[in-house]
Image (cartoon, rainbow, N blue to C red):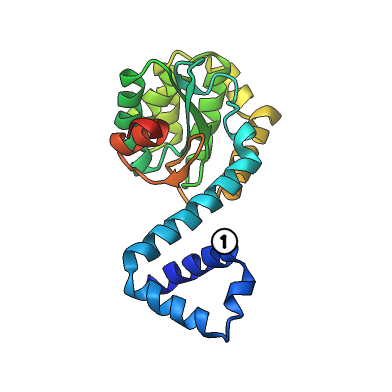
Amino acid sequence: MKSNLLGAALALVFGFLGAAIWSWTGLADARTKTYLLENPKLLQQMAEAYQEEQTRERLAGVSGEVTKAFPGAILGNPDGSKVLVEFTDYNCPYCRQSMSDVQQLIESDPEVKVVVREWPIFQGSDLASRMALAAAKQGKYAAFHDAMFAAGRATPETIKRAAIDAGLDLDQARADGASQEVELELARNHALAQQLGFSGTPSWVTSTQAFEGAVGFAALKAALDPDES
């Protein structure tokens, strides 16, 4: 761990101070390494600053696209000024665990808009994601989203039951789920997740942060409202 942090910290030092400082008889490098290892808090702070800078660079390239929702695939206020993006999978237990946190976030602030990006990476979840996007086209995304997570593991049987519970036109939903529009959306979500460096679900994006995991309500709220934390 220290080795990784040291590498990140030294990268920061190189970026901020420039190579010229390091040419001083070749001793600055060794002395800086020793100093950083003897001051782990500074090492941690520098590594975190480096990671934050990397995140900002990744977000800069995709920020406009990642917050642009598939029509209807939104939870909370569609016109909300505070945008949280969630990459999710219906067979991900941590996504199911995070549902209550997202709902609490929506209920706590009427300005919260959650853009949901369907990213089916678990076995068997592709069909559920397609049905979810088909539900979005019928204006029933939230209803299917909630019913699908409540139904348990995504299987053809539970997906059909969730679709019925959400009141979908099943024939139209099946056709929409197989459409090129939905195919392109799933491919886009996968590409965005890769660009952002995500390795699993749930993953989250705000205007300034990109992070992974079932982090809980407090962490989501802090990421969405950094000035209030």
Q: Quadrant of the C terminus?
A: top left
Q: Is residue 183 visible?
A: yes
Residue assigned mark 1: 16
Query: Residue 60 appears at what percent x and percent y?
Result: 62, 41
Q: Is residue 69 left or right of residue 210?
A: right
In terms of depth relative to the viewer, which is nearer, 73 or 205? 205
* Rendered residue at 39%/35% (across/down): 226
Q: How many marks?
A: 1
Q: Is residue 151 visible?
A: no
Query: Residue 212 appears at what percent x and percent y?
Result: 42, 46
Within the image, what quadrant is residue 72 found in? top right
Query: Residue 69 appears at what percent x and percent y?
Result: 58, 26
Q: Is residue 59 left or right of residue 122?
A: right
* Rendered residue at 57%/67% (across/down): 14
* Rendered residue at 42%/25% (across/down): 145
* Rendered residue at 37%/24% (across/down): 146
In terms of depth relative to the viewer, which is nearer, 221 or 124? 221
Q: Secondary structure at mark 1?
A: helix
Q: Is residue 155 left or right of residue 181?
A: left
The three-letter code of the residue at mark 1 reads: Phe
Q: Quadrant of the N terminus?
A: bottom left
Callout 1: few (<14), some (14-19), or many (20+) C-alpha neighbours within 10 Å? few
Within the image, what quadrant is residue 6 found in? bottom left
